[in-house]
Amino acid sequence: MPHHGQGHPSLAFLHVDFDPPGLESAEGPRHDNDLVQIKDIRIVPTQAELTCERPPFLPSNDVPGAPHHLPPGWPRLLDIHFRLNREDMIDQLRQGIVLFLQALHKTTPGRRRDLFTRNRLRQLVGEDVSVNAYGNIELHGINVSDQRRGSTRVSFDQPSQIKDRPEKKRKIFWENSRRRLIKNSLVCFIYPAEGHDSVGVQDPINGELRLSLGVIHTKDVDEMAKDAKKAVVHVTMIDNADYCHLVRAFKKGAISSQDIFMVESLGGYFESYRHILQALQMLEPVAMPFGKYLAPTVEQSIRGSVALITPPRYAMAPGFEFDLSVLMRTGIRCNLTLNVKDSYSQQRAVATLRAYSVTDDTQSQALVNSLCREVALISGPPGTGKTTIGVDLMRVLVHNAARMQCGPILCICYSDHALDQFLGHLLDKGINSLVRIGSRPSERSERLRNHNLYELVDQKTWTRAQRIARTQARSECEKTAQSLEMVDKELHSRQPSVASILQVVEKDSEEQHQSLKHGHRKGTNDSRRKKWKNGKAGSSGGPILLPLPSTARSLNQLRQAHLWTMSRWERKQLVEFWVSEVKRDIQTRHTELIERMKNCSQAVEEVYDTIRRDILRNARVIGVTTYGAARHQTLITTLRPKIVICEEAGEVLESHILTALSESTQHLILVGDHLQLRPKISTYELSSESYPGQQYNLDRSLFERLINTAKVPSSLLTTQRQLVDGGKVLEYRNVSGMATNLFFMSHCHPEDRRDQYLALSASNTFEAKMVEALVQHLLKNGYKQSNIAVLTPYINQLTKLRDTLQGTTGLAIDERDQEQLNDTEDKKHITINFVNSQSFDNRLTLRTIDNYQGEEADIIIVSLVRSNTERDEQGWSPTIGFLRSPNRTSVLLSRARHGMYLIGNAALMNKPRNGIWPQVMTELGKNNRIGPGFLLRCRNHPDAEIPPATTPEVFKEYMPNGSCTMRCSMPLPCRHKCPRMCHFDDLDHLQSKCQELCARVHRLCGHPCSKKCIEDCGSCQLFIGRLILPCGHKLENASCAQRRNPHMVQCEVRVKKRLPYCEHKVEMDCRDNANNVQCKVRVNKRLPHCEHKVEMDCCDNANNVQCKVRVNKRLPHCEHKVEMDCCDNANDVQCKAICETTLKCGHTCPRNCLECRSTSTMAVMCRALLPSTKIDRTVHGVCHQRSSTARLCAPNAASLVLGRARTKKIASYPVVPHALDYLAISAVRRRFDVAISALLSVANNVRQPYTAPSARMTQTL
């Protein structure tokens, strides 16, 4: 950002310092993107542009006589706003990247490694630079899914404050880090250029680093928080060649993940700028309307000081008149019309509106003027009804839309909040034919859901042609995605496939391609090779291979030469050429598919645009933000809207208004207040509040420029409904607990020491504590949290106020402020604290002043923060910074309905260089509204002496409950006096509980009540002595009520009673009934189902008791006897006795009864060891005898099996299962040396010598 000295630059200096763009400059273009025509400039900056040392060309704006390479008119105006808005977008990113590159070069390798390990890369550029840096970058290929199509999956190290934290903590961090990696924001990848070493040893000035830009496509919080070490985001690269270059560098090992950094700017949001800049490029200067007012040429500029505004073209049609009857009050019938060409008709309309509508004098005049001027401006301070007149204008225009034939009316606002509010007012007035373009409705705009374009598209019935077009477009996207996925895999592979190389060779030379395919028949002496193969070559056969050439021809010659006549060096050169051609071909196809993917996605959008166009064409009103209007410029232009109305125009950048205009626009209405806050920009040096920015004035709205500079006539609303007490205001009660409704508490407590992370932001701890005390005092006086708003100009003070208030108060913080808070805490590497999650309707509003414009609250508390005595570097006395702005002061002092309380340094605010604050302080002083402490007053005891609250402790000491410390003494419903200290809760004492003694007497006995006043008297509890009960027992200390009703007394004397059903005696209270007592005496009872006697309680039923006596039962399936409980069923018991059945081989079965029974249908094999049987050699075997079918019974089965194997007759015997069973037994014993070699040979019918089992094997078996 160039700085041209201090103060407003003179015209002479501007002419001397003027350096036009591109080839117009005497020094030539600054870089590859420094061009004369804005249509040729790339919106995304290039590497040369980001690292250029020459300052960019920034034309002066709204400075009469300032030099420019284009003559006055639309081309110059569009050029100015394109270049300034683009600079606002890239300035902070450029500064951050340059500082980061310089830091990489200057920082020692050890320091870099330390910061990299601790994830403190941001410290390389300093914490006051609005950039985030991420390290250890890895690319994971192209996404082809519907939601992320065409983007690249990029992983990086988690920020240090959440690294290795629980997943829940990481998720909360990313959910609240809204300024980190915002969708559609710009990021820059920094990595070594090809052929250079790692980042650590490079000089950025010599171009040894490469910069590649991308746009955040998707930020999935769940995916980012999933891994403790690495976060993942999806990025769309601006230039696909950069992506291919990075992949190749990774693949070759030229760079590693630690050599790549990703830097993002926290300044201008790329997506919002991109659409505005694209729209500015697309505008045709010759087709732009209202040139004589908005962008006059030299001839138009000298015609006069005040422009004469003509009526809209559509209103000039013969016989056309506006019907204003829709504005008449209910019950009044008046056919009021307006002819914009007749001055008498205009005067009559104004007079009639004053008499019969709800508009006042200035509103009536403004409404008529706006209908009669093609460029209409309506201004007015807060409380004059600007929104009301805007709604009335819309009612008139919609009412006359059919006769005007003007198409939809385009209503634009800067913010979603302002747009939703304005459209809500239209719905309240019965204007239902409106469509809201933009994001899907939130909870606050639920009533607009049925008017949202997204919702209407979902509900729309598609025609057959539209469905076919959508299906075809999506099908083409799918095909392209599949092709892209295959090519991307080839791009990531380390070596190209043989098929890819053959394709390249085939394109380059058919002869070489055929030679490669059949190359095995060339280059050898076939006869010698055959002799050698057959063992007949001998020692004199000669060499098999022919001698290789040793030539070194050029690549062009090699591409036409015979492959099998080349030297080794030549072949290597040719192969390297083929591989490079394959890589180039893959990159080309990759880029083409990426471009085709974009075109396919655009085709799908165009299909949806046909549906959107049909919906919008049938609407009377189209509501959209200025950003949305630029994004959907093509769609809106096809609707050819003739009327554009902008609400809160003083907050809208001029470029945003220009992009909403088109050739069809015939009527422009701007409503706003240019004396309130100006539009927000990212670069302070471009704002009119900064010294260098006074030549750029980027934050000056078109509304302000037309009123102050262009001298376009405007309508001023002057009837005050907010700053002047009206009838409704007189009905408001004074603020409870305070002596005045307006007060400025002056103090001398200095500001806090400036935070190293927020050098431009101030804070004051004393004021934060004072605000917290005042808030609690008001809440104790009966106010709801939602009735109070706390405002401050500084984000650092907002942080301090939040930390002070959130422990006791539910807070509602604006999303814009919350983003700044998150960024502040992110810079400090601390974990984000979150506000209380109470109902949104019952939370205290905490906001910066800049984000509170257009809103109100019953009570406003303002922390001004500034309180210092130090002089600046030039010796000037201390100032209040940007608080001196009259626009900001106007907003701050006009937000309260019932009361406003300011905390600050009155002496500092009264300094002459502080804008309008000296006048404000003078007015406050005249009315005794300035003092060292808040004046408090008890509503119950207004005469109580309470000192001014100069510190938070005063509230606690003198008004701890929001009221004074005197005794309440108000009469309770029982006529006792309230003993509490003065209080505001339960003023009618309906909930009070009197603790005095009761003064009533009992009616039946005349005794006084002995309870407290709050308690029910009940029956008389006065003790009268001993009482004989009806049962004969005596009750000591009986009460009066018990003496009157002795039969109601429950006797608690313990006695023994005989139970009626068992004759046992049981001890119980005298009052107990023996019929209801269960006998617990232990007795022996005979069980009916088994005749055993079992001890149990007398009250137990013997039929329900299970017998646990141990008995022997014979099992029904095997006749064995098993000991079990008497209650057990023998059918459910498994027998574990030894079988002992004699097998057919004569041995006894060694298994238990259960195993035999379970294998009764299978072959039961005897496991007994047999004596040696001599067949071929002495061996031991295992008897395997089937119990059902004894087809094989031999003293030595293994020997027999092996014998059968020698005669190749094994197939005729069912021997193999036995042999395999033998193998299984051996495997279980982990002895495979004999079993595997012998028995697998048997199973496979393979002849193999037999090896006898070892002695150890025999023992194991």
Image (spheres, rainbow, N blue to C red):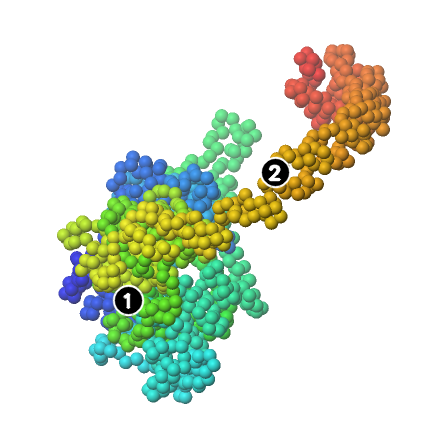
Q: Quadrant of residue 786?
A: bottom left
Residue 269 screen position, x and y as percent: 36, 56
- Vertical placement of residue 1126 versus 555, above or below: above
Viewer-proximal residue, 444 or 55? 444
Residue mark closest to the camera, 1 vs 2: 2
User: Is residue 1180 in sight in this rendering?
Assistant: yes
Residue 1233 horizontal side relative to residue 260, left or right: right
Residue 675: which numbered mark, if any?
Answer: 1
Q: Residues within 10 Å of mark 1 (few under 14, many from 20)?
A: some
Q: CA distance from mark 1 to mark 2?
A: 87 Å
Quadrant where the N terminus sits is bottom left
Residue 53 screen position, x and y as percent: 23, 52
The structure residue drawn at horizontal position 29% and vertical position 42%, both measured from the top left corner, is 124
Residue 849 screen position, x and y as percent: 32, 58
Would you name the residue on which mark 2 appears? 1024
The structure residue drawn at horizontal position 47% and vertical position 70%, both measured from the top left corner, is 427
